[in-house]
Every structure is written in structure tokens, then in C-alpha cells.
Amino acid sequence: MATDLAAAAAILGDPNSYANEHRLHEACAMLRRDSPVHWAEPEWAYPFWAITKHADVQEVERNHEIFRNSPRSVLTRKEMDDLREQQGEYIRSLVHMDNPDHKVYRAIGADWFNPRAMRKLQLRVDELAANYVDRMAELGGKCDFVADVAVHYPLYVILSLLGLPESDFPRMLQLTQELFGGADPDRRRGESQADLMAPLMDFFNYFNELTRARRQSPTDDLASAIANAAPGGEYLSDLDAASYYVIVATAGHDTTSSSIAGGLHALLTHPEQLAKLRAEPALLPTAVEEMIRWVTPVKSFMRTAVEDYSLRDVRIHAGESVLLSYPSANRDEDVFEDPFTFDIARNPNRHLAFGTGVHYCLGAALARMEARSLFAALLPRLRDIELAGEPRQVVTTFVGGLKYLPIRYQLN
Ligand code: HEM
């Protein structure tokens, strides 16, 4: 248990905490109450201000000219920050950029995620969702919902949108999990700097090839849009194009699969909510929103102040970084009634799981659609479902959720 604020801040900055939600939320609640803008000094990463209140996360994100994504948008190990200092950016995606570049680069992909594009995709997503429920039926009443369903389905959707061949999907899955799972011994290749960089290098080699292929013969997919974009009259550099694919491919599936798996887990551990949803399928949109709030698969992003700024009564100096804690913001008692109650009818639900402001998640509509389609396909076919073992969470401070969810079920 966190006995003081320093211990609570250490918990917030410790990747292991995210595999033990009770401990994490207890620490966040203490910080929100007693020190919502708190200086934290983890051993493995450079220090930051921990921002734990919903209103403050919003304030920082909306002040994007003062709180910049560059040079430190994600909490990483000191060695990785040092490497960036010495050698420059090794990835430059939307989440690493600020205006004016961010606005220009975001526009390249934006049309692929707007409501019109989503309507075009709906039938295909519904079809895929139905296929994965069929797959559950074929598995004979028992599966690991994460490994057998939740990780494949969103990956399939996003890689199809990008236009990658199906034969490459397993490789993309492994690389994403290694990239996001650098803190998890089950997922990373090793602990050295080279081991941590290796998945990114593999991604880049693969995507540089893709850029060349799509410039030679463009097709009707997002990869071609990225490869052939020429803002200011010039193609994107290899680094910028590859970073774009990496952010879409990675942000587009681990997050959604965590929401779906965590959402099912929440229904299994709150059987009255599962019964309610089955009785009232019209609640699916609010239920999905609540699942995303409950799971909050993106644990944090960072910003760095370019000038001094006072948040509450705390002076944040130019050059200091802040860590935006989304799980904490999404349990903030000032915004959510009974924040620790899983309520599929919660409305309004002003969660910040997709962030806010100019970096607001590009794929939010897609993620919502995927989750709705899967539960719309699964729930009417369920006769019975229960946990078949102890679920396990990923060790991370960035993107995570369940990595193992054993279930037993009967389907119609
Ligand atoms: C950015 C969450 C699904 C693509 C973000 C951010 C968050 C987030 C918190 C940063 C927002 C900020 O800084 O204010 C989530 C969650 C998802 C999800 C919780 C699923 C439940 C997706 C999907 C895609 C996607 C399906 C599809 C491509 C992106 C991209 C960005 C982003 C490209 C960068 C946007 C920018 O910096 O302008 N997401 N995301 N995400 N997300 Fe998602």
C-alpha cells in the first residue's frame, strides 16, 4: 500500500503497477487528493510532474503551444532518452510532432478515419467480427480470448486498411507487442539498448520497402496515401513515412484489443451488467464507452513545457516534463459519479481514454466501431460464459491491458 506521496508517485512510474490495478488506483487516488501535480523521480526514467486530475490533463493538452509533444512524448528508459539526445529522433510520428508539422501530417491520414470512411468500412468490420465469433465456436467452448480473438481482430482491420498482405500480419503482431512491451519480460527481446531498438528497426526495414513499392505502383489503401503524400511538394522522408505506418499499425490494434478483452473481463466480473446488456442491446454504445474508460489502455503520454506555467499552485518550469495519467483522470471523483463502478449505461461519460485536443486519437471512431461490432456479434450467440482461470495484465507504463484471459463458454 502507498503510505506516502513519494511511494504513490513511484507506483505511478513503475511498469509493474499497471499489472496490478488495485495498487495503481490506490496510488492515483492518493495523488489526486493530496498532490495532483506531483514531482516524481523513478529510478529507471528521468523525472516528471505526475498529472492525475481530469481537469489538469485537459488543461495541459489544450495548451499545446506551451506543453509540447517533442522531445519526450512517452515515458521511456533513461538509456532511450539519452540515445535520442545523442543521435536525434529515431521515430517521428504524429505523437512526436508539434505544429506546424503535426497539422500537415495529420491531414495526410485524416480522411481514412472520418465518418464517411467508417461507414464504408462498417460491413467489412461486421463480417470480420462474425468470423471471430465463429472461430470461438470452432475452438470448442474454451479459449484464451486475448490470444485467440482480441489481438487478431483489430490487427486484421487496421492492416487491411493500410493495405498489407495477410501473410505479413503475424510479423506485425509480434513487432507491435515487442515495441509496446519493452517493460514486460514476456514480450521484450532482451534488456539491452539494441534489444529495445530491434523491433523498431525491423518495422522500419519492412516499411521502407513498402514505401518504395507503393510509389512505384500506388493502390487504393492508406499505405499508398502515406507513401505518395507530398506536403510542400516533396515526398515524406523514409523516417517520416515509416513512422506514420508504425503509429497507425501499432496504435490501431493493441489499444483496441485491450479494450475488447478488458471489456469482456469487466462484463464477466460484473454479471449483472452482462445480463443488462444482453437484455438491452441498445445500450451497446454506452457500454463500449464504459469499457474503454474502465480499461483505459493508453496509460500515459507526456508533454514538455517550453515556458514556465502554473498548474494549480505548482510552478512547472520550462524544460520540465509532465506525465498525463489517463487511468487516473478516468477515475476522477470530480468528474465521474462512482468512478469505481462499472456501469454500462453511464451517460455522460467524459473519459479521456482517447486524449483530447489536437492529438485526440485519430482512430477513436474506428476503435468504437470495432468494439461495438464484436460485442454485437458475440452477445446474442452466448448461452453461457465464465472465467476459466486467472487473467494476467501486461507490464507497461504506456499501452497495455490483458495479455491472458482464459474463458469457458457455450455459443449458439
Ligand atoms: C493517439 C488512445 C485506437 C490511431 C491516441 C492518443 C490516445 C489514444 C490516448 C493520444 C491522444 C492525445 O495525446 O491527446 C486510443 C485508444 C484506442 C485507440 C484508447 C482504442 C480503444 C486507435 C486506433 C487507431 C489509432 C484504432 C487507428 C489507426 C491513433 C493515432 C494517434 C492516436 C494515429 C496519434 C494522433 C495525433 O498525435 O495526432 N490514441 N487509441 N488509435 N491514436 Fe489512438
Image: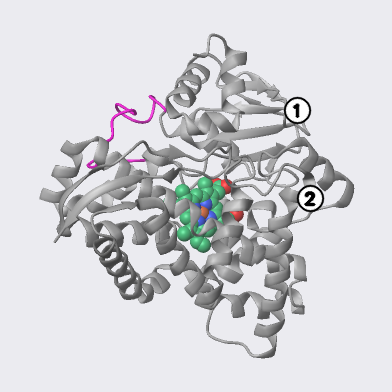
Instruction: Tell me if residue 346 can be seen.
Output: no
State if disc 2 and disc 1 touch (CB < 8 Å).
Answer: no
- Give the labeled residue for mark 1: 317
Boundaries of the magenta span: 332-351
At label 2, counting other C-alpha atoms closer than 10 Å, the crowd grade (few under 14, some 14-19, many 20 or more) is few
Label 2 sits on a secondary structure element that is helix
| Residue 2 vertical position relative to residue 74 in the rendered view, above or below | above
Assess mark 1: CB under 8 A from ligand 1?
no
Image point 56% across, 9% down: which residue?
A: 4
User: Percent from the top left, x then y, of residue 166?
Assistant: 50, 76
At label 1, counting other C-alpha atoms closer than 10 Å, the crowd grade (few under 14, some 14-19, many 20 or more) is some
| Residue 190 vertical position relative to residue 234 in the rendered view, above or below | above
Frontmost residue, 130 versus 367: 130
Image point 81% across, 47% down: which residue?
A: 84
Q: How many marks?
A: 2
Magenta: main secondary structure equals loop
User: Percent from the top left, x then y, of residue 77?
Assistant: 73, 37
Left or right for 343, reference 400: left
Q: Which amino acid type is shown beneath numbered disc 1?
A: His
Task: Give how far apart the Cα atoms at labels 1 and 2 are.
Answer: 33 Å
Instruction: Tell me if residue 231 can be seen.
Output: yes
Quadrant that contains the C terminus: bottom left
- Give the labeled residue for mark 2: 194
Seen as rendered, the residue at the extreme right is 86
Seen as rendered, the residue at the extreme front is 140
Left or right for 73, reference 345: right
Label 1 sits on a secondary structure element that is loop
Q: Which amino acid type is shown beneath numbered disc 2?
A: Ala
